[in-house]
Each structure stands twice: as C-alpha cells, then as structure tokens.
Image (spheres, rainbow, N blue to C red):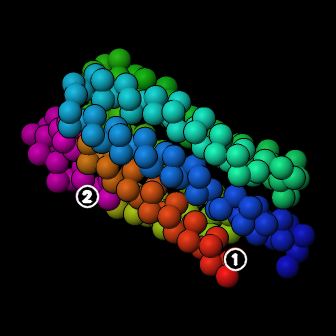
Amino acid sequence: MSGLEDALVELARSNYQGAVFLLAYGTTWLVCAAMWRATEPKWAVTATLFQGMVALPVALGISAWLGMFEARPGGELISRLGILISVSQLLVLPLLIVLTVRGRYTLVPLFFSLAGAVHFVPYAWLYQSLLYILLPIVLALGLAAIYSTDRATADGDDMSTAGAGRVCALTGVALLLTGGFAVAARSNDHQ
C-alpha cells in the first residue's frame, strides 16, 4: 500500500468510517420524520432545514470525546479534503430556502436528502468503504420510489406531508443502518 492508502485506511479506522456523524444525522432525520406526522408543515420544514444545527455539534462533541481529532491520519491535506467534502452539501441550501419561502415545504426533504446522497459518494474514497456507495444508491432508489408513489404527486402537487415524512424516515434509517455497519466493521477490526 502507498502512504496515501495507508493514511486513508487509518483515517477510516480512527473515525469509525464516519459512523458518529451518520448516527447523529440519522437520529435528527428520524425526529424530522416524526414532526412531519405530528406538526404543521411549516414547523416540520423548519426542523428539516435546521436539523444539522443539532446533529453537527453532537457529532463533533462525540468525536472529540472519542479522541478522533487528535493526530488526524493523512495530515492537513486530508483534513482539508474532508472539510471540503463535508461542506459541499451546503450548496443546496439556497434552493431549499427558496422552496421554503415559496411554501413548497414538502419538496425540501426530498431535495435535501438527494443532495445528501450525492454528498456521500466521495466518502467512499476518503474512507475506503463500499458503504458510501451503497448508501447513496439506497437513498436514490428509495427517494424515487417514495416520490413516484406519493398520492399528491399523482394529482400534480409537490408531495404529501406523509410523503415528506417518509423521505425523512428513509434518510434517517439509511444513515443509522450505515452508521451501525460502520461501527460493526470497526469492531470486527479489533477482534
């Protein structure tokens, strides 16, 4: 293995292949799914838009507690690449804000989740893991299935609130399962 490959393997091992972030965001997406069922769409869309403001600090705090920021493998270059990949999904925020301002609330989870799916692909290389190819495939296929079967879309409307909730639930479950598999893979490395 080359020095870069060794650094990437060590990065994946020391960061549990990003499991902490997957688990934190998976949890907030599931909270959003519940909100689409239990509250007004304007509150559910607000939670969906801002769920990262809860998940990110939680994930960063747990990562720091686990010592994941001490002596990052790969050095500064890999750290900067990781940051660049992680903030790339923020590029969808202007569209999500426009959809929200125009009252197209139920489309926000769909576009947000799709942007997240695309965002995960580079992590397959960064963490040297097939999980980050499978996760976007599951999300893309699941989102297509939810959108194509949603009753509101058949009537020409954006999506039903139930459909928006299903998008959040799919995203949350997919993230939690991927995070669980990443933790299990890390645990198997220790045995």
Residue 96 percent across, percent down from the top left: 42, 29
- Dot 1 falls on a residue whose secondary structure is helix
Amino acid residing under circle 1: His
The residue under the point 64% across, 70% down is 186
The residue stretch that appears in magenta: 142-164
| Whole-number angstrom distance, CA of label 2 to CA of label 1 | 38 Å
Quadrant where the N terminus sits is bottom right
Residue drawn at point x = 58 percent, y = 57 percent: 19
> Which quadrant would the C terminus be assigned to in this image?
bottom right
Q: Is residue 165 left or right of residue 83?
A: left
- Return the residue at label 1: 190
Q: Nearer the viewer, mark 2 or mark 1?
A: 1
Residue 83 percent across, percent down from the top left = 72, 43
**Residue at (39, 33) in percent of width and height:** 48
- Left or right of residue 8, residue 58 in this image: left
In the visual, does 146 lie left or right of 168? left
Residue 56 vertical position relative to residue 185 in the rendered view, above or below: above
Say left or right for 6 vs 23.
right
Considering every residue shown, the one lying at the far bottom of the view is 191
- Image coordinates for residue 130, horizontal then vertical, percent: 57, 71
Magenta part mainly helix, strand or loop? helix
- The residue depicted at 33 percent of the width and 54 percent of the height is 170
Q: Which residue is mark 2?
A: 145
The crowding category of the residue bearing disc 1, from other C-alpha atoms within 10 Å (few below 14, some 14 to 19, many at least 20), is few
Q: Position of residue 157 (x, y in %)?
A: 16, 35
What residue type is disc 2 on? Ala
